[in-house]
Amino acid sequence: MDLILWRHADTAPVKNDSEPDIQRRLTGKGRKQAALMAVWLERHLPDSVKVLASPATRARETAEALGRKIVTVPELAIGADAAQLLHIAGWPDSRQAVLIVGHQPTLGRVASLLLLGEEQDLSMRKAAVWWITNRIREDEFRPSLRAAICPEYL
């Protein structure tokens, strides 16, 4: 199984306490970041990838840059649990690649859980993609990092 973690792109700061965090939108810089990453992803993603996004506006706007069907999943909202994210993705058993557009610290925690075997707060830049693949070796699932890239390097 391939699990692709995509952190939402740059967002406008919270202006005041009356603005709900979930409604924050991408900045101009964020839209450019999302577009750059979408071009890279389109070159590498399988056609059958399932795209799941947090209901936060910034995550959905990031995912929309791909131009593919997106499923909004309330359980992927800000503050989501790493184990719940893996369950939603169908890790490690899904036969389909899954792309999740979400938030920190959840995405970093998922990556550390899979790659290091324990949940830690790994930092992940805005609009970055971490592609984790899971292969069976010697009758064991062995996750490995296939790619980690941010828009500044594209």
Image (cartoon, grey):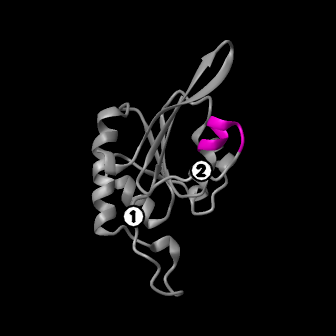
Residue 141 magenta-drawn? no
Q: Nearer the viewer, residue 98 or 140?
A: 140
Identified by mark 1, the residue type is Asp
Residue 117 magenta-drawn? yes
Q: Nearer the viewer, residue 148 or 4?
A: 148
**Residue depicted at x 44% and y 73%:** 24
**Residue depicted at x 30% and y 41%:** 40
Q: Residue furthest top?
A: 138
Crowding near the residue tagged with mark 2, few <14, some 14–19, many ≥20 C-alpha atoms within 10 Å: some
Looking at the image, is 75 positioned above or below residue 94? Answer: below
Residues drawn in magenta: 111-118
Crowding near the residue tagged with mark 1, few <14, some 14–19, many ≥20 C-alpha atoms within 10 Å: many
Q: Look at the image and tell me whether residue 92 can be seen.
A: yes
Q: Quadrant of the N terminus?
A: top right
Where is residue 87? Give x, y as percent: 65, 42
**Residue depicted at x 67% and y 41%:** 113
Marks 2 and 1, the one that precedes in the sequence:
1
